Amino acid sequence: MTTEFSFFTVIAELPGLTNVIVFPNPTVEQIGVRMTTEGTRQLEVSVLDTKGVLVQQFPTWNISGTAYRNWSVESLRSGKYFLQLSDGSNSWTTPFVKN
């Protein structure tokens, strides 16, 4: 039996971003983000370990309106990580599990 949850949220730490979904969680190969932004934004996307150490950096994500993007996390060991989105001034972090 499986249960699926969908959450839509506003990210107060990154003003102007709404309807953010991070999935799948837990993940095996890829982590995806879907969101809506007011105007055009450039976001730095990175993965941190549980100590806050950068373990993976992805190319800058240029987003406008509603967009979806996924990134490979196959090279990560199994465990708990944090996906961080940053616009250079503000950032938002959410946990995910890599199986």
Image: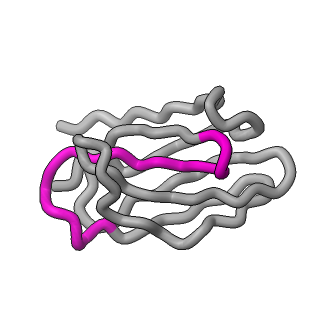
Quarter of the image with the N terminus is top left
Name the residue: 35% across, 65% down: 56
Q: Residue at x 83, y 45 (%)?
A: 38
Above/below status of 61 relative to 11: below
Q: Is residue 58 above or below residue 18?
A: below
Where does the image place residue 63, in percent across and percent down from the top left?
A: 72, 60
Please tell me whether residue 82 belongs to the stretch shown in magenta. Answer: yes
Identify the residue shown where x is 63% and y is 65%.
61
- Drawn side of residue 72 relative to residue 16, left or right: left
Nearer the observer, 58 or 63: 58
Q: Give how far across and how far down residue 57 sits, in percent.
A: 43, 66
Magenta-colored stretch includes residue 46: no
- The percent coordinates of residue 22 (x first, y second) are 46, 46
- Residue 85, horizontal then vertical, whole percent: 54, 49
Residue that sits furthest to the right in the current view: 39
Please state the extent of the stretch shown in magenta in the rendering: 73-90
Name the colouring of the figure.
one colour
